[in-house]
Image (cartoon, rainbow, N blue to C red):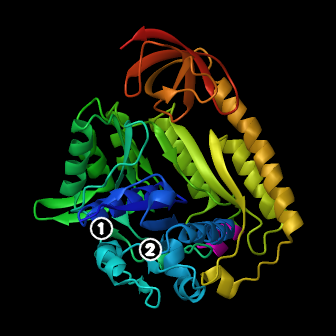
Amino acid sequence: MQERKIYIETYGCQMNVNDTEVIFSIMANHGYSRTEDMADADIIMANTCSVRDNAEQRIWGRIDQFNLCRKNKPNVIIGIVGCMAERLKDQLLDSHKVDLVVGPDAYRTLPDLVEAVSPDNPQMNVTLSRVETYDDITPVRIDKNGVSAFISIMRGCNNVCSYCVVPYTRGAERSRDANTIVREACDVFQKGYKEVVLLGQNVDSYFWKSPTGNVTFANLLEMVAQVSPELRVRFSTSNPQDISDEVLYTMAKYDNICKHIHLPVQSGSNVMLEKMRRRYTREWYLERVAKIREIMPDCGLTTDVIAGFCGETEQDHQDTLSLFKEVCFDTAFMFYYSERPGTLAARKYPDDVPIEVKTKRLNEIIALQGECSLKSYTADIGKTFKVLVEGPSKKNPDELCGRASNNKMCVFPDKTHKAGDYVNVRVLSCTSATLICELVNNI
């Protein structure tokens, strides 16, 4: 039988990257091999994100590009998988531009759906599950450098923040068997990976009931850290309402658990936080930041923020700016509010902040964060960090780059090491996004 090939473009978060790796594994068991050449593919798919409207608009454009391949290969199958498939299932099929629409919990059915596709018979499965975690599937790793591997520890979310589509596109929260997570970490380490990133919409609410006892996220962190001291452990994303002292003390206990926490704040205004249904206050958030820095003084801290949420006043915006000044995040993902149909906010609150006001406020946050980033990175000048080499610097092939434990990118002249090596570097100078270093001594 002739080999069949599948091409997948992945959009959005790290969890989507891991889902693409799961899909490749499922399809490989049914005779499909991965290709990076769209023109060579028998199946072309986009693994999509619905968190922001511009992400969806980009996919519609890509679907048009996918369809151009039909001119040279009329039998090519075009599919949309992931969150956009879940949210816009009928519209995608009604457009007559795709043959296959599959939600995040239905990837096991992909081989059968593909076989059933015909020009007059598109296929769809967007059934959400309360149990699916894909914990028995070994993902096909698609990273370029073979250094860092994503491991999904849970799926879905129960928080139902008013602006967020995730509970509607990925379903209810469920945690994966801790033993399968540890086995996967062992597997990637044996294959030469030096870092794992544990993924979940809210990793701090991870909870697995086993015959030998319950496993919390702190327990799981320790289990994965004990795979090997040479295996770095990162995780994302934390929810301010759930990150416990136990997690922080576990991080501090193990050198190979990276000292970096991504802690989305979304707003510095209690009024906005309540309307967003974030279930914590500004004061609670600042207390968590203080506790993190008490237990791990050098811990890297990054965040997400939304400018111009429904009803946001100038005072609410100023509250956000003042929180940014107080915390001084290393970096932040910053966006203005994009209404997502079907969410609580879309049903309940008018999107009443004018776009020009949203843009102005976002630009003010971006400018302030630029100052904070430079201040944070400048504070590291003179320090020595252990860095995991990721490969050559994008700007200079004579330099290597890699991340310190605090997640800051370091670049340094070096022609003797390679991706996957650990090196010690000293920080000489910086930009607002990079530590410029020198190699000090081999590890």
Please name the residue shown 28% across and 60% down the image. 28
The amino acid at mark 1 is Thr
The amino acid at mark 2 is Arg
In front of the other: 181 or 40: 40
Please name the residue shown 60% across and 50% down the image. 303
- In terms of image quadrants, where is residue 409? top right
In this view, the residue farthest toward the left is 211
Q: Residue 197: x percent and y percent?
A: 39, 46
- The residue tagged 2 is 170
Q: Residue 55: x percent and y percent?
A: 63, 65
Q: Is residue 54 placed above or below 341 in the rendered structure?
A: above
- The residue tagged 1 is 133
In front of the other: 177 or 160: 177
Please name the residue shown 40% across and 48% down the image. 142
| N-terminal label among 2 and 1 | 1
Q: Residues within 10 Å of mark 2 (few under 14, many from 20)?
A: many
Question: SS of the residue at dot 2?
Answer: helix
Q: Is residue 159 visible?
A: no
Q: Main secondary structure of the magenta part?
A: helix
In this view, the residue farthest toward the front is 72
Q: Is residue 411 placed above or below 203 in the rendered structure?
A: above
Q: Is residue 269 placed above or below 367 in the rendered structure?
A: below
Please name the residue shown 58% across and 45% down the image. 302
Q: Quadrant of the N terminus?
A: bottom left
**Structural distance between the alpha carbons of marks 2 and 1:** 11 Å
Q: Range of the magenta residues?
A: 271-277
> How many numbered circles are shown?
2
